[in-house]
Amino acid sequence: MKISEIVIRNFRSLKDVTINPYQFNIFVGQNNHGKSNLFEAVEWFYNGKGNIQDIKHCQAAHSEDVEVEIEFSDVQLGIEQISNATNQEKLKKVWLFGISRDG
């Protein structure tokens, strides 16, 4: 299972960012230009921890949401590699639900 796209909106310094990662990625840039915010947004996707007002982009309107979307490819292969059978079955149900809902 691989991340094929990351979409971040209104997360700290990242107003509207879409990243399509490759097999190997290097993030280079000056200090205070959002590299850490990118990784913190991915962490927030998985954990959902933090005060929303502290992580919301400073120019976002009150009604705008903080959004982090991650799209995965090769999901079936990733599910099959999970060693915990209970977790594997849970993810299969979510994956199959997504397929039946989308088409």
Image (tube, rainbow, N blue to C red):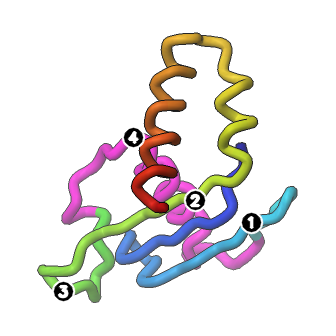
In the structure shown, which secondary structural element does the residue marked by tag 3 occupy? loop
Q: Do the numbered discs 3 and 4 sit on residues whose CB atoms are within 8 Å?
A: no
Give the spatial CA distance, label 3 vs label 2.
26 Å
In whole angstroms, how far apart are the C-alphas of marks 2 and 1? 11 Å
Q: Which range of residues does the magenta coloring cover?
A: 28-54
Q: Give the mark nearest the N terminus, 1 or 4.
A: 1
Q: Amino acid at mark 4?
A: Asn
Label 3 sits on residue: 61
Q: Secondary structure at mark 4?
A: helix
Q: Residue at x 56, y 21 (%)?
A: 88
Name the residue beneath numbered marker 4. Answer: 47
Q: Amino acid at mark 1?
A: Pro
Tell which circle, 3 or 2, labels the residue nearer the N-terminal end: 3
- The amino acid beneath tag 2 is Glu
The N terminus lies in which quarter of the figure? Answer: top right
Left or right relative to 77: residue 43: left
Q: What's the residue at 53%, 31% (across, down)?
A: 92
Q: Residue sitting at 30 percent across and 69 percent down?
A: 66
Which residue is denoted by mark 1 in the rendering?
Answer: 21
Sequence-first disc among 4 and 2: 4
Q: Nearer the viewer, mark 1 or mark 4?
A: 1
Most foreground residue, 52 or 9:
9
- Which callout, 2 or 1, points at the residue further toward the start of the chain? 1
| Label at residue 71 | 2
Q: Position of residue 101 (x, y in %)?
A: 40, 55
- Based on the picture, tell me whether residue 36 belongs to the magenta stretch: yes
Work out whether residue 42 or residue 23 is closer to the camera in this orientation and state it. 23
Looking at the rendered image, the disc whose residue lies closer to the viewer, 3 or 2, is 2
Task: Inspect the magenta stretch and tell me whether residue 93 lies in it.
Answer: no
Q: Residues within 10 Å of mark 2 (few under 14, many from 20)?
A: few
Alpha-carbon neighbours of circle 1 within 10 Å: few (<14), some, or many (≥20)?
A: few
